[in-house]
Amino acid sequence: MMETRRRFVSAIVLLAGVATCLAAGQLPPAASASRAVRGAPAGLPAPAADSAEPVRQADLRRWLAVLASDEMGGRGNGTEFLVKAGDYLAAEAKAIGLEPGGENSTFFENFQVVSARSANRSTLTVEVNGQRRVFRHGEEVEFGPYVGGRRSFTLDQVEFVGYALQDPTIGHDDFDGKDLRGKAVAWLGGRGPAGSVLSTIALNEYIRPGAAAAAGVPVVIGLSPSAIRAEAAGRTNTPRPRTSDADFTTVGPLDAAPPPPLEVAVLQADAFYSFLLSASGVSFADLKARAEARAPLPAFTVQGAKLILTLEADYTVVRSSDSRNVVGVIRGSDPSLANSRLVLGAHYDHLVTGLNPRPLDGVGPRPSIARVNDSIYNGADDNGSGSVGLLAIAQAMLAGPRPRRTVEFVWFAGEERGRLGSQYHANRGPAADRIVAMLNLDMIGRNENDRPERSKTVNIIGSDRISTELHNINEEANARLPVPLTLDYEHNDVLNVRLHYFGSDHYTYALKGIPVIFFNTGKHQDYHQVTDSAERIEYLKMAHVTRLAYETAMRVANLDHSPVRDNRGVRAGKGRSGPIR
């Protein structure tokens, strides 16, 4: 699981930006050896015969013993060990009967990771009733550092959508009931309306663009991060200092267009918005005052406005490296559904051996860990558990009637560096446009915070945000399990301080408006430590979580339609459970 952004301080909610791949359970060294063959944790009865189960503990143990072994050297990105791990997964995928889903009839999907500096010359031209003004990058507006190759396009529909916010804590949804597909949207009010206690960082870096992407919005225009900070602090607009030798890291060719929405930050709000709204009969001064007071804002079509975006930048490559995903496929048995795809994913990369990462959220190694003579980050839970869970699901699907819809199994590289593998896979061309849903398994092998009472609990994240139907499919699948799990939605809550929804590979697909579910069992003190090893895994629990993902996947794969995308945002949160009607 990767570390989410580290700038998470808000006046109201402290958001410790953590990687959304969690889990639980650490024993002192003397006790850890006894976990090599683990029975049922308290409260979770074992199946009568493991061999009769579609997901078998014995297989999970066998696969994880290899994938999380010292011989795999931590599976760090850019190392020979990740190559070795990919070879192993490809061999096992072939052995259980998956078809190659990569390039040239192989199991490998190759991509290049590029970090670069940007010299951006992009412009946003606004036409209002025949009058034209050009707003330039770095002067009146600011584009992201990576805009792809030189291109220009025009949008003649612009909507003002208030705060551009979905906040279920106060029943506020600026996207509700609006058809915004193919339209540009503009917004004001970096802190959101009165009563909202969402972090401004979560709101502006994640929630707004995520909601816009799910709604099919190609361009989002709003205040710059520095303007938002100035608004919140009542001081002048100040730029953020540079913290890296590269402006961005991406996958694929630099002339490829990044996925929407394209975000344009307004640096000179008065000049830009006054001109944009000049034919709409709406006073920008009034909107600005209302936004600063966090009062209700109207929504309206911006009359007479047309936007011409000219995107152009020169890039200087700072460094680059090759990487690859592992991809296997089960072809759908129904010709009418076989062209559509369900993606099941898990990242197989972990950490570079010998480089001890800074523990997050103040969670550090226990004193006993400091005495362990070990430098290998085995990554058994993060994310060996999800990776072998994927093998188990594929094996179970191949053992019975083939699903009607094509199912694609993807083991991602580069998640720990910012979801790079999933970015490549989700945006690789027409095949990505046929994805109906994505299920992500990331850290599914432990109890959160080593709490035995959570032995029957799995965190479900993101299931309700884009498709209510997908949420309910997962609830039904769980209810029909021989041993139903407790589905915990606390980490799905918009007020959860760890931002798990934004921190693993499923979020890449959510940004494309694809319904997702993130299966996860919680954080523990072995997270990103050398002690995240196979003997600490709760194999029975991992089998049950994997079984739930399998049952949910089979329902989606056999559904005669794509899960309905109603884009209603978060409803399942802390203290909530059950289907949404």
Image (cartoon, rainbow, N blue to C red):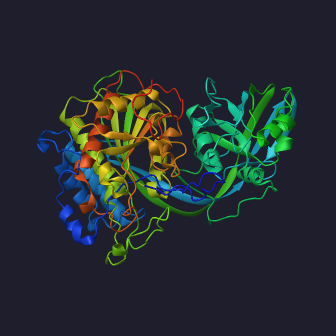
In the picture provided, is 375 more to the left or to the right than 260? left
2 or 299: nearer the viewer: 299
In the picture provided, is 527 more to the left or to the right than 316? left
567 or 574: nearer the viewer: 574
Residue 449 drawn at (x, y percent): 37, 57
348 or 439: nearer the viewer: 439
In the picture provided, is 206 more to the left or to the right than 77? right
Residue in the image at 87% along x and 31% along y: 278
291 or 205: nearer the viewer: 291
Q: Is residue 394 above or below residue 127?
A: below
Number of marks: 0
- Quarter occupied by the C terminus: top left
Q: Is residue 37 above or below residue 206?
A: below
Residue 297 drawn at (x, y percent): 75, 32
Residue 260 drawn at (x, y percent): 60, 39
- Quarter occupied by the N terminus: bottom left
- Residue 162: name its quadrant: top right
Residue 419 drawn at (x, y percent): 48, 51
Residue in the image at 67% along x and 45% along y: 150
Q: Is residue 560 visible?
A: yes
Residue in the image at 20% along x and 54% along y: 61
- Residue 475: name its quadrant: top left
Q: Is residue 99 above or below residue 14?
A: above
Q: Is residue 104 above or below residue 7?
A: above
Residue in the image at 83% along x and 26% along y: 280
Q: Is residue 103 visible?
A: no
